[in-house]
Image (cartoon, rainbow, N blue to C red):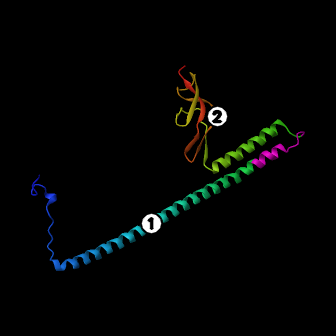
Amino acid sequence: MTDKKDNPFEEPVEFDIETNDETEVVEELDSELAQAEEEIAKHREAMLRMQAEMENLRKRLIRDLEKSRKLALEKIMKDLLQVWDSLERGLEVDAQSLTVESLVEGQELTLRMLEKVMQDHDLEIIDPAGQPFDPELHQAMTVLPAADVDENTVIEVLQKGFMLHDRLIRPAMVVVSGKP
């Protein structure tokens, strides 16, 4: 058996309270407890209100983001309709009066219209012919020995690349020069 003096946790707690003041102390503690519980209830209610506001804000932001996407898509689609109309007019041309030159000219005009729409919407064409190979922007399809250009230079563009708002969405597929 252990001595009570060896274990400080088993020592009796002494209060300096007289017996007749005990009811006052209990009433005071009950009052403080009630105030603390009231304060807890207020903070809990405020926290729940704040959580509800945050959830409503999150839902509103999602709705606004979706609305913005739809409006942005609507604008680009309206701009692309001009290109559609141009292609449609080109198909309506009388085959009797059609020449190769007029067909090529119509395609060039339509391509320029499409390029303008793309530029208006920050879609940038990557056409790296003659530039140093950049693996961040180009995808090398093959390497060919070339004596007339520096090594690791794009000597042919098989397919142009595209960047949208400074973000690569399709790398340019290229042929790169190697050692002769």
Q: Quadrant of residue 46?
A: bottom left
Q: Residues within 10 Å of mark 1 (few under 14, many from 20)?
A: few
Q: Nearer the viewer, mark 2 or mark 1?
A: 1
Identified at 60% across, 35% down, the residue is 172
Tell me residue 28's x, y (percent). Answer: 25, 77
Asked if the magenta segment contains residue 146, the reply would be no
The image's mark for residue 48 is 1
- Residue 173 located left or right of residue 3: right
What is the three-letter code of the residue carrying label 2? Gln
Identified at 60% across, 31% down, the residue is 174
Mark 1 residue element:
helix
Mark 2 residue element:
strand
What is the three-letter code of the residue carrying label 1? Leu
Mark 2 sits on what residue? 159
Range drawn in magenta? 84-96
Tell me residue 41's x, y (percent). Answer: 39, 70
